[in-house]
Image: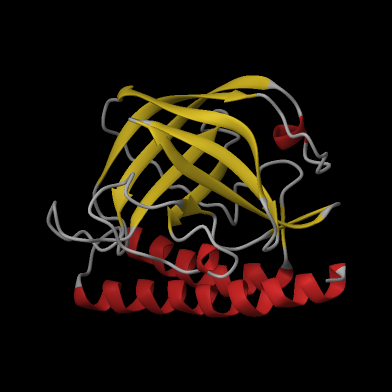
């Protein structure tokens, strides 16, 4: 498959259906349950450490390609906020850097396959299902999706994939102790990690859900 056709397939299969679903879910949940956070209303803030061994295949994104360690803040949450033990869409929000200059990555429970990696799925716990960023980032290598796959208790293997291609490991995310409760507004549209750019179509589809969330908080 050529780069152009793969990019088109990713955009159609991932960005279109997933972006519209996210926006519709946010609006519907906000109407049914007015709150400062229509989605992921409750969550647990935890400290975290990322150990990056780097990618075997260069992506042009230093954070994926280079070895290193990062201190991070993570919020583990349930999208709809159903009672514990009920299947729900789980989220893992990851913040790198200080709050004054943050870089945010958001993962949601999905599948791991060529198509299912772009589809939201429900599980009973945050480590029941694979997690991905759902929508691809633009890099010099082409469209790249990130994944966080449970590997041990409170541990996730961090991977990247070129569109719908094979997953390649670049590090491990280890969750630490619960951190003091505080309000953190994770926003991957505004707070981008260097080298991971948003496709314009992804921004257009993703922005409505975050705009709805921002309005609900104010």
Q: Quadrant of residue 32?
A: bottom left
Q: How is the image coloured?
A: secondary structure
Left or right: where 15 falls relative to 176: right
> Is residue 68 positioned above or below 208 on the image?
above
Image location of residue 17, percent across then percent down: 53, 79
> Is residue 161 positioned above or below 44 on the image?
below
Left or right: where 127 falls relative to 15: left
User: Can residue 218 be seen?
Assistant: no
- Is the C terminus in the top left, top right, bottom left or bottom right quadrant? bottom left
- Is the N terminus in the top left, top right, bottom left or bottom right quadrant? bottom right
Image location of residue 72, percent across then percent down: 49, 28
> Is residue 76 positioned above or below 215 on the image?
above
Left or right: where 147 falls relative to 58: left
Q: Quadrant of residue 207?
A: bottom right
User: Which residue is nearer to you in this view: 152 or 218?
Assistant: 152
User: Can residue 1 be seen?
Assistant: yes
Residue shown at 82%/76% (left/top)? 5
Residue shown at 53%/73% (left/top)? 19
Residue shown at 84%/52% (left/top)? 141
Image location of residue 153, percent across then percent down: 33, 30
For the image shown, how many numbered marks are present on the structure? Answer: 0
User: Which residue is nearer to you in this view: 145 or 182?
Assistant: 145
User: Which residue is nearer to you in this view: 138 or 147?
Assistant: 147
Left or right: where 38 falls relative to 146: left
């Amino acid at each position: 498959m050529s780069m152009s056709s793969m990019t088109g397939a990713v955009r159609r299969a991932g960005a279109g259906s997933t972006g519209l679903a996210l926006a519709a879910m946010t609006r519907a949940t906000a109407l049914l349950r007015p709150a400062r956070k229509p989605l992921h209303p409750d969550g647990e803030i935890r400290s975290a450490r990322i150990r990056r061994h780097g990618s075997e295949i260069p992506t042009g994104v230093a954070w994926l390609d280079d070895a290193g360690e990062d201190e991070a803040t993570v919020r583990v949450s349930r999208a709809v906020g159903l009672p514990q033990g009920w299947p729900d869409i789980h989220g893992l929000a990851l913040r790198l850097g200080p709050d004054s200059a943050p870089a945010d990555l958001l993962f949601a429970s999905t599948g791991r396959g060529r198509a299912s990696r772009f589809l939201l799925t429900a599980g009973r716990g945050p480590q029941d299902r694979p997690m991905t960023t759902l929508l691809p980032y633009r890099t010099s290598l082409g469209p790249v999706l990130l994944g966080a796959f449970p590997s041990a208790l409170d541990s996730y293997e961090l991977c990247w994939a070129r569109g719908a291609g094979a997953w390649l490991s670049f590090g491990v995310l280890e969750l630490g102790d619960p951190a003091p409760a505080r309000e953190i507004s994770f926003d991957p549209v505004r707070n981008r990690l260097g080298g991971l750019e948003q496709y314009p179509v992804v921004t257009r589809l993703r922005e409505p859900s975050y705009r709805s969330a921002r309005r609900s908080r104010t």
